[in-house]
Image: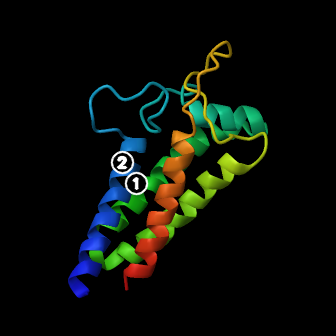
């Protein structure tokens, strides 16, 4: 049983850390346009431009984006170290609660995020980002319960 918990803890922590790294620095070549928090130029990140436009809070792009990206990197580092993993899981859950909340608030982000900032384009992600946020929130809560 102890081995299963340890393996589960590592799998959840690595999944969460990889997703946070992918969203903030995207270590793979050819990152998607407008989806990498720390390397998008101001006004290019689709999620935070949409949030800023819908809420009227202009500080969300780029200030809020950089703050969220920094918090995600801290959570990723905490998740990798077993001694701080439970704190990282808590931190991750708080971040993901904010993401899920932004998706669910009427008129803010929505469950389907546009794939482009071009107002003429009606193409969305089909809810993939929302589903990822739910999966990461679930993984964070599971990890918090598993890790002691």
> Which residue: 57% across, 39% down?
127
Task: Using the image, determine if residue 110 lies above or below residue 123.
Answer: below
Residue behind mark 2: 21
Quarter of the rendering containing residue 109: top right
Residue behind mark 1: 73
24 lies left or right of 98:
left
Q: Tell me if residue 28 can be seen.
A: yes
Looking at the rendered structure, the secondary structure element under dot 1 is helix
Who comes first in sequence, dot 1 or dot 2?
2
10 lies left or right of 63:
left
The colour scheme is: rainbow
Where residue 55 appears, as percent x and y from the top left, is: 77, 40
Q: Which of these two is toward me, 88 or 16?
A: 16
Task: Using the image, determine if residue 73 lies above or below residue 25.
Answer: below
Q: Are marks 1 and 2 in contact (CB under 8 Å)?
A: yes
> Which residue: 49% across, 49% down?
132
Task: Using the image, determine if residue 63 lies above or below residue 114.
Answer: below
Is disc 1 surrounded by few (<14), some (14 to 19) or many (20+) residues within 10 Å? Answer: some
> Which residue: 21% across, 82% down?
3
Looking at the rendered structure, the secondary structure element under dot 2 is helix
Say which quadrant the C terminus sits in: bottom left
User: Depth-wise, is mark 1 or mark 2 nearer the camera?
Assistant: 2
Task: Using the image, determine if residue 98 lies above or below residue 93.
Answer: above
Q: Which of these two is toward me, 8 or 33?
A: 8
Q: Return the mark for residue 37.
A: none
> Which residue: 63% across, 31% down?
49
């Amino acid at each position: 049983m102890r081995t299963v918990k340890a393996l589960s803890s590592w799998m959840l922590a690595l999944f969460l850390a990889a997703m946070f790294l992918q969203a903030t620095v995207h270590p793979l070549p050819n990152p998607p346009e407008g989806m990498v928090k720390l390397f998008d130029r101001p006004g290019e990140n689709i999620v935070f431009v949409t949030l800023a436009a819908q809420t009227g809070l202009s500080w969300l792009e780029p200030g809020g984006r950089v703050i969220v990206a920094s918090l995600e990197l801290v959570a990723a580092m905490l998740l990798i170290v077993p001694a701080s993993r439970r704190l990282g899981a808590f931190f991750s859950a708080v971040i993901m609660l904010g993401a899920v909340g932004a998706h669910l608030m009427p008129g803010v982000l929505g469950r389907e995020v546009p794939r482009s900032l071009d107002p003429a384009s009606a193409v969305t992600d089909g809810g993939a980002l929302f589903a990822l946020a739910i999966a990461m929130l679930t993984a964070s809560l599971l990890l918090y319960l598993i890790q002691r």
